[in-house]
Amino acid sequence: MEHEPGSGRFCGREHRLPLRIYCEDTDFSGVVYHGNYVRYLERGRSDFIRELGIGLSVLMAAERPVTFMVNRLDMRFLRPARIDDRLEIRTFVEVASGARVVCRQVIMRGNETLLEAVSENVCVGLDGRPRRLPQLFAERIAPYLPLAIRPVAQPEPVRELAAAG
């Protein structure tokens, strides 16, 4: 997979996307308009999968085209971003199974957390109905899932020893 300039980078399981705040992002006071954070989070999620070589254009061009719809988005605003700030959108994939992908995201300014978010995204066909995650998607995203939820072999059942009689 070839790295695209401007699409961020991976740091372990975490994808990091740099972002500069411009005048167009802010209200009259120089503070980022709250609705813009939704766009920033979307960029973080989109560039995460694009960096894996399975961006939305790849998924839409497949034999069975799919895309993602946001089913749930919870955001907690902690501090405002301001004009000229350099931010970083950090994205972690927490769950990828069935038809859904759950991401945890934070927006940082240096070491300061500005926003925390959790999004649930549903894989859908062009008819809008949920579809299982494509195999290529599941394979490419698996290394970025928490170890605790990666598929593992089931342990053998414990056999009890017969009491000697």
Image (cartoon, helix red, strand yellow):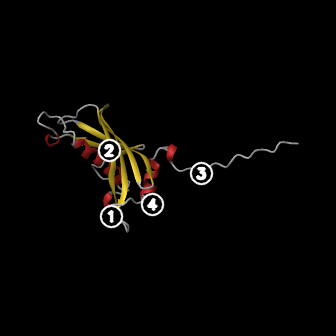
Structural crowding at the residue carrying mark 1, measured as other residues with C-alpha within 10 Å and reported as few (<14), some (14–19) or many (≥20): few
Q: Classify the position of the N terminus by image quarter.
A: bottom left
Q: Can you tell which of label 3 and label 2 is closer to the viewer? A: 2
Of callouts 1 and 3, the N-terminal one: 1
Q: Distance between the residues labelled 4 and 3?
A: 19 Å
Residue at 33 percent of width and 60 percent of height: 128
Q: Name the residue under label 1.
A: 127
Residue 135 disc label:
4
Structural crowding at the residue carrying mark 4, measured as other residues with C-alpha within 10 Å and reported as few (<14), some (14–19) or many (≥20): few
Residue 108 disc label:
none
Q: How far apart are marks 2 and 4 (CA)?
A: 25 Å
Give the quadrant of residue 123: bottom left
Residue at 36 percent of width and 53 percent of height: 49
Q: Is residue 84 or residue 131 the one in the foreground?
A: 131
Q: Mark 3 points at which residue?
A: 153
Q: In this view, does 144 lie to the left or right of 158?
A: left
From the top left corner, tell me how far across and down residue 43 is, in percent: 28, 48
Q: In this view, does 66 lie above or below 159?
A: below
Name the amino acid, label 3: Ala
Q: Is residue 162 left or right of residue 125?
A: right
Name the amino acid, label 2: Leu
Residue 73 disc label:
2
- Label 3 sits on a secondary structure element that is loop
Of callouts 3 and 2, the N-terminal one: 2
